[in-house]
Image: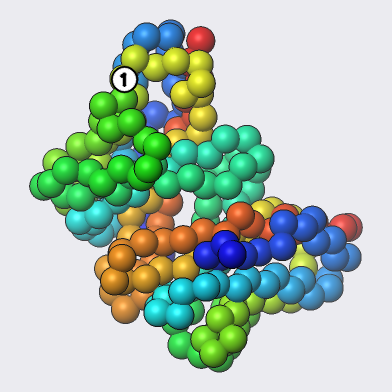
Amino acid sequence: GAVVSQHPSRVICKSGTSVKIECRSLDFQATTMFWYRQFPKQSLMLMATSNEGSKATYEQGVEKDKFLINHASLTLSTLTVTSAHPEDSSFYICSAPKQGAVYEQYFGPGTRLTVT
Amino acid sequence: QKEVEQNSGPLSVPEGAIASLNCTYSDRVSQSFFWYRQYSGKSPELIMSIYSNGDKEDGRFTAQLNKASQYVSLLIRDSQPSDSATYLCAVFTSGTYKYIFGTGTRLKVLA
């Protein structure tokens, strides 16, 4: 397998503040990482594809100015939720594919964001 | 038609039985196929990957792929209560560099 870490695991913030979530691939390099959001009892929803050294690609309906993504190195991508609101409360999960014949994708442990 | 379809369940099986989880996909050029297990409140964990037609076994898990029928399945032998989780099927296409997930099948293994 492969290891992807995510920090913090839980965060509570006040409405209007910004929160940064870090995603790291610990034992492989990842030119691409993905950011997902999952609401309780719902499916994973892909928010954006993070590309090392270039702009992220956002899925339809995801506000790029609200969810800022930076992929500054081959092992680190960050997601910043700006001006958070209670409706942004969710489980945010990053993933990184390990390139090879099969392109196995490994998930971080997730970050539970609660906006009060 | 959804790109990746799974029965949402719940699928209930007695402890020790074989659990059979199924997934169909619509894109014929899909190349790699994955099964993830997700416990409530946790992130998905990769349990099997397969890209060639046929069976692939790993411990109690067997993945089966039939590209002609666009069908992939996961068998769990000797099911344990700890296998109770949601199982996600995912399909990867290198041309689009996209992973498409099914909505998951909830498995309950009854002790």
Asked where in the image residue A36 lies, by quadrant, the reply is top left
Q: Is residue B80 visible?
A: yes
Residue at 84% across / 61% down in the picture? B12
Q: Chain of mark 1?
A: A
- For mark 1, what is the residue? A82
From the viewer's perspective, tell me whether residue B21 is left or right of residue B42: right
Q: Quadrant of the N terminus of chain A?
A: bottom left
Residue at 66% across / 40% down in the picture? A41
Q: Work out whether residue A63 or residue B41 is closer to the camera in this orientation and state it.
A: A63
Residue B103: percent from left, percent from top: 61, 55
Residue at 50% across / 34% down in the picture? A91
Residue A70: percent from left, percent from top: 20, 37
Q: Is residue B46 visible?
A: no
From the viewer's perspective, tell me whether residue B49 is left or right of residue B93: right
Would you place residue A40 above or below residue A83 in this image? Answer: below
Would you place residue A95 above or below residue A40 in this image? Answer: below
Asked where in the image residue A16 lies, by quadrant, the reply is top left
Dot 1 amino acid type: Thr
